[in-house]
Image (cartoon, rainbow, N blue to C red):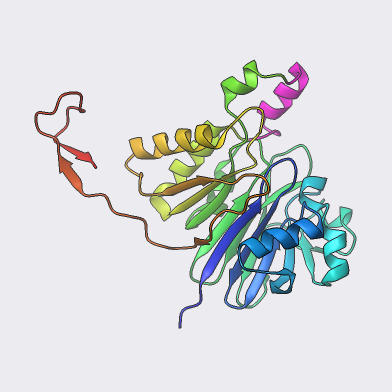
Amino acid sequence: MESVFRLSVLSSGSSGNATYLETGKRGVLVDAGLSCKRLKGLLVRVGRSLEDISAVFLTHAHTDHTSGVKSLLRERPIPVYAAGGVAERVKGAELVPAGEVLDLGSLAATFFAVPHDAPTYGVRVSDGRKAAALATDLGEISLEIIEYMRGVEALVLEANHDPEWLRRGPYSADLKRRVASRIGHLSNEQAAEAALALAPHGLKDLVLAHLSETNNSPMRATGTVRHVLKAAGYDGIRVRAAIAKHPTPWIEVGQPVASHPHVYRYGEEGTRSRLFDLG
């Protein structure tokens, strides 16, 4: 019987980040930026517990990604893996060089560097048949990063801000420049461009993460990305937003997207002037 590869973003944002994924009998936590008590409560909401976690991957050493590691390990002594610049800052973490495959049997992972204001990584995870990737703190996406993500069927990707909301918002000028810089955070439009680049290569589920509570909203982020994908004919890709303290529904990696039949639009006022349109 084919094993299921699934994930849930347990919480995402500046108040704490954690994603749980599992394949076969192995469960992994990507980042632990919440207290052990809060992690327990979030796991219960998706039908899991600390006992289901067999390893932790850390993408970033800032506290919103690591603050729960120490308390978690007190209750469940499990391996913690991170790449250079992150492993050295978290006691007990094992160093995994970026670009090298970490083989955990039913699951393999590869860390890849992303541009941020501290050593930060995305991670690609595969069960040997399907793949997912996460990248939630980065200022821009290069072709090299796209290559690491190419072929994933599920992607958790930062969509931190709407550029206009950021420009008009309450942040100081220095902070606005930092957020919008290449070592800051991705905008909705940048996330949409990345999704569009990956859409022809099997992307089926996209979770927009690390949304700013001040300069973005779930509706704004998902609306921007869906509009771009739909305009290019990829409206079957499922797009949702992850938010703080509320786990996303389970995402089954590789679940087929819905097909949309062509609908004849002859003679209707207000419709686009083309013979076939997507329903």
In the figure, is residue 167 to the left or right of 64?
left
What's the magenta region? Answer: 171-185
In the figure, is residue 95 to the left or right of 247?
right
> What percent of the width, then of the height, locates residue 237?
40, 49
For residue 269, what is the image quadrant?
top left
Q: Residue at x 58, y 24 (%)?
A: 163
Q: Residue at x 76, y 18 (%)?
A: 172
- Eyeballing the image, is 244 above or below 3? above
Which residue appears farthest toward the bottom when viewing the image? Answer: 1
Q: How many numbered marks appear? A: 0
> What percent of the width, then of the height, locates residue 217?
57, 33
Q: Nearer the viewer, residue 136 or 263?
A: 263
> What percent of the width, then of the height, locates residue 64?
78, 46
Residue 65 appearing in the image: yes
Question: Quadrant of the image for the N terminus?
Answer: bottom left
Residue 100 appearing in the image: no
> What percent of the width, then of the height, locates residue 28?
68, 67
Question: Quadrant of the image for the C terminus?
Answer: top left
Q: Nearer the viewer, residue 40 or 22?
A: 40
- Eyeballing the image, is 228 above or below 4? above
Q: Is residue 176 magenta?
A: yes
- Eyeballing the image, is 151 above or below 119? below
For residue 13, what is the image quadrant?
top right
Q: Is residue 146 magenta?
A: no
Q: Residue at x 79, y 70 (%)?
A: 79
Q: Residue at x 61, y 31 (%)?
A: 161
For residue 46, what is the image quadrant?
bottom right
